[in-house]
Image: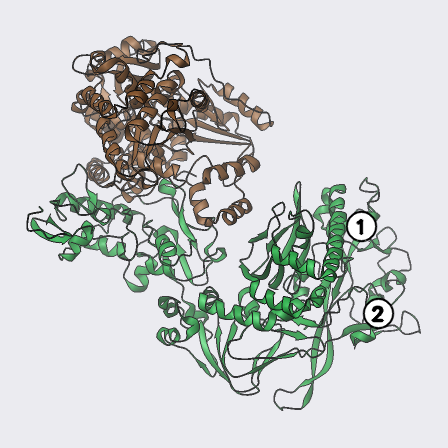
Amino acid sequence: MIFDDLRAIQLRHGFLPKAELEGLSQRTQTPLYQLHSVASFYPHFHLVPPAKAEIRVCADMSCRLNGACELRADVERRFADARPEDVQIRDVSCLGRCDHAPAVSINDAIFTDVSGEHAEEIARRAIRGEDIHEPHPEQARVECKADPYGDGAAQNERYDVVRKLAQSRAFENVIAQLKAAELRGMGGAGFPTSMKWDLVRKEADPVKYIVCNADESEPGTIKDRFIMTHLPHLLIEGMILAGMVTGAKRGILYIRHEYHLQEEILGEEIRRCYRAGLLGKSILGTPLAFDLEVFVSPGGYICGEESALLEAIEGHRAEPRNKPPFPVQAGLWQKPTVINNVETFINVPQILARGVDWFAAQGAGVSRGLKFVGVSGHVARPGIFEVAMGTPMREVIFKHAGGIRGGRELKAFAPSGPSSGYLPASMVDVRLDFKALAEAGSMLGSGAIVVCDDSTCMLDMALAAVRFYRNESCGKCVPCRVGSQKMTDMLVRWTQGGLPESQYLADLALLEELSQAMSLTSICGLGQIVPAPIQSVLKHFRAEIDAHVLKGQCPSGICFTPAARAGEAQRVGIRP
Amino acid sequence: MTTAATPPGMVDITLDGNVVRVPAGVSVFDAARMNGVNIPTLCHLQNQTPVGVCRLCVVDTGARVLTASCVRTVEPGMKVVTNSEKVLNARKTLLELMMSDHPSPCVRQQNSGDCELEMHARAAGASQARFAKRTVARGKDDSSLAIAVDHDACILCDRCIRGCDEVKSNFVLGRMGKGYSAGIAFDLNSPMGDSTCISCGECMVSCPTGALTNKSVVGTAIAAGPDAQGFEAEDLLQIPVFKGVSGTFLELNRGAIVKRRFRKGDLMCREGEFGSTAFYILEGKAKVSISTPIAHVKTQGGAKGFFKRLTSTLVAREEDKREGETRDRTIPIDASVDLSYGNPVAELGPGDLFGEMTCMNFYPRSATVVAESDVVAFEMLRNVLDIMLKNKTFRAQLDQTYRRRALENHLRGVPMFADLSADFIEHLKESVELQRFAPGQTIALQGEPADCFYLVRIGFVKISENYPGGEMVLAYLSRGDYFGEIGLLGGGIRTATCTALDHVEVVRISGDDFRDMVARFPSVRTGLETVASERRAANQQRMQMVHNVSIDQFLSQGLMEAQSLLILDLQNCTRCDACVNACADAHDGVTRLVRDGLRFDQYLVATSCRQCRDPLCMVGCPVGSIRRRNSLEVIIEDWCIGCGLCAQNCPYGNINLHPFEVMVDDPERAGRKKAAIKQKATSCDLCTHLKEPSCVYACPHDAAHRVDPRTFFAEMLGQGSTK
């Protein structure tokens, strides 16, 4: 595999020297350009020797709301005199530690709740050549309603659904039950799971794949991290079930590379399953076979797009495919493929173990099932919570997450990261449900609830969101590649204020045209959703934007400060 | 909608309100085209796999979003709208986005007015982009001889990439980077001219904008001069060796190749001259020879003492035995034949290519070629030769000629292989592989398994060994040299890295053939083993030294590289110049020593050959006449043609050209001789004809010394002697 080869070279040299790539090209008969085009795509690979301390400050949503910009400025001051070969400081996209913001990655080890002093100390250790280790704060054992086996169950008490299905082979029945439960995909799109599995089951090709998308990278999304830490057995059971039902004999668990601890936990669980005969060429002595492996993502938000993820597994640049065909017909290596989110997979054994009625009863009101949500931003108790589907947002924010921190007022919330846009405090009674959120002009998405108090500048948040998409665009298609940059340029100009009204109106019209074109013509969801944050802010917080653009005022005092200008100047251009 | 009347293999769709019948499996784009609806596109070409990245061809099929028609297959009953306001507005915005970053008018628009982006933008009324312009330029790449790259005009349509991969199978071009900073790149993002690109021109003809354009080679045309005849691309394509070459490429490179007619006796090229073209003979015969006398430059000292002015003369090899000199019987030249030492003349005929090294690497001509009869030949510049060399037909023909005519000489030219039997040579002729390497490309990597043996056919190969913190050049090998035997005879692992310094061609003998050869011919084995162990020992000694000495200044002055230095102790030196005068006296009045140079401690390192460990002077010698003895002392072989490249290459100015008056064939009057001045390179010969260097002997103050820097400075460097 190309990534294994590249990683091996990087492990030896700290980066990818030209001569090594030429050697690899000759050995593997891979054109040089292919190696370069892949290596230059993924942030994981260095084509030039990296600094001794590569400091990456997350500046997305929750970290931004928790002082990431100030932290970065602080760290820059601390290393103002450092040599470039010693220290390099840059922004990084969401690291998936939103409940412990701000997060900083130093030489790929991730540190949470970081202060400037803390970051400096670690970086100095790195410069001295000492090893730095990522702390894995002991995660308290938690009882999850979702686990039918209960916390602390032994291995032989778990995987009961797999054991029974291996005997009964009532695969059609599984699909019927999922259909009756109305289980929908939990990664964001909400496609009916029973339909996806059924389509793959009916494909004649003898080679099929099950892929788990554990690459949650949407800012604010941390629920899968929690599930993989605490319920790894349910995830693996869900994948084995998918394999049995669809006839796929191989599964790949695609995990983001920032989840080192979860990678270990899952690896351990998979080995346990092989020892217990739950995985392998003969599941529990039956002719059923299923092999499962963990694939560590070489990085990037776009890898969470299902077809881009498949491209990454195949060793290509993670560029989304044109659809149709969809993965159910032509997925991994053009074979029929089920690709589901972590949370979708864990719902399957729940439904099969306890029945459709139990599942339906877990939801609030007309909603069904349980939902894991991550709540972060300006809340008193940021974290991951297991709530009933259909729970009002008010309850999630104020009861579970402890309400707004520091006695301030709720101003806005994003039901699911930047992609869901921002809803105003007045809509906090909206229920956590596919339909209810769609009606509110938002979406359930991946349950990444980010809460903003009344000190937040919504234009700043919208700009940060667009910039995130700009940085994470794969660049394959024109509307997303160019459009995300032009939209960033426009919003940057807005945050600088002083535009004549005629120009502002022209900008608004142009933004509308651009939003339309991006939503209608981008290949994948990333490009289509880029306009969502600014459009939601224009809809709900228009006065705030007008104040910026026309009066040069930021009601929250975020923009127009010298620090904001200095930081902006650095970030306006394209990424280095 | 598919009705009962729809025949099998056909599909009915609604296109802009009209029901049309199209073949099943075609794209919506093609279905529309078949029905006279032309959907605009930038990234789609009929001969390439559609990729759907420009999105300009989007149409409305009633779904939530628009769909790119080039990648969407028709489905029965599909309702396609290609021209609604929604569709047209989206396309216009896309064009405006691209135009905002486009250097309008781009080179293509300026040259031929047919930049596809600008044409579509004008048609859609999107020429004036309202979006902010790109702030950071992506740059230009002018390194290719044939193709100009303007990254700012690139819209990442991937047409060049598919042209390179799918159409030509060259696999040079790809996307690099991500998002807005993505771009196209050659190989590992090398400049196009340094990449493995063969200038086939496919990317250029695929490009819709001015990102990849034809560089005007007509400006550098060689078409000037009498008897030159340019051609039309169609004429060229009729000639077998151009079979398979892109017609567009030839069209764009008119002027980079001409057909020349030479009359009997005409000079085609002269040894020692710099050039940039290669010749391919179509008709007639030509004589290739070296006219510089092949002999030693000998400085003879008389019995009357050292201060008598000495004279240098040319002396035959037999009369002046030199230690370490090869007894090679052939002289490698830049053609498919080698010349014999005794009679350096050979004949070239139809199908022969010569001047390849000069053309590809810009080295001086290695020999003189004169038309023996009337000759018709192509003369071409590098971009044409390059593409011809990549042409399988032409390549096969050249390889065949080489195998037939030169390989045996080449093998036999290596003294060690003199004993190979005729049948084994015949076997090798067919089984060896001829390989080409681009400048900088690694041929073998230290530490990798050794599986073959190489003979250098064209170009220079750098042999180097890595040590922690650096690289040590062990040797530069050129035509007639071989490498790879240490790995094969030893532990099966490459002990050094071999890199192509320029355009290199090697003869690759497989590990099996090699083992077969050493098993069958014990003398070859013994010879190779001796050389291998000598090379190993020399390398070890050198590496040893690298480890022992590490004084920054010593290194930075290049003294580390030197084996022998002429140093003047400035505490004793009175600047009397007796050393310089003595040198001049010893060498026909031309001093090979300048009393100037770098200072190290109290010593002046005088400008005189240092016998460098990385002898840059040897790189590029067109006839391979500068080399060194096993002791690493630099030696200039008899067949030096006086081109002066080594003198240019020496960073220390320590090689001089020495003129001689000789009688040569008069080109104007056949059969007559005339006097001419020929040059030969000379460097400090350590006055080997004397007991000690005359400069050292002449110094009245005991200030001049010839020393091995490592030994001499060992104490100063705080090390014991390394010997």
Chain of the residue on which disc 2 is drawn: B
Q: Nearer the viewer, residue A59 or A47?
A: A47
Chain of the residue on which disc 1 is drawn: B
Q: Nearer the viewer, residue B560 or B449?
A: B449
Read off the residue under disc 1: B709
Name the outermost residue toward the right.
Answer: B304
**What shade does chain B have?**
green
Badge 1 density bin: few <14, some 14–19, many ≥20, Cα 10 Å: some
Query: With respect to residue B4, does A461 lie above or below?
Result: above
Q: Nearer the viewer, residue A122 or B437?
A: B437
Read off the residue under disc 2: B586
The chain assigned the colour brown in the figure is A
Query: Helix, strand or loop at disc 2?
Result: helix
Query: With respect to residue A490, does B711 lie above or below?
Result: below
Residue B458's quadrant in the figure?
bottom right
Name the residue: 24% across, 16% down.
A369
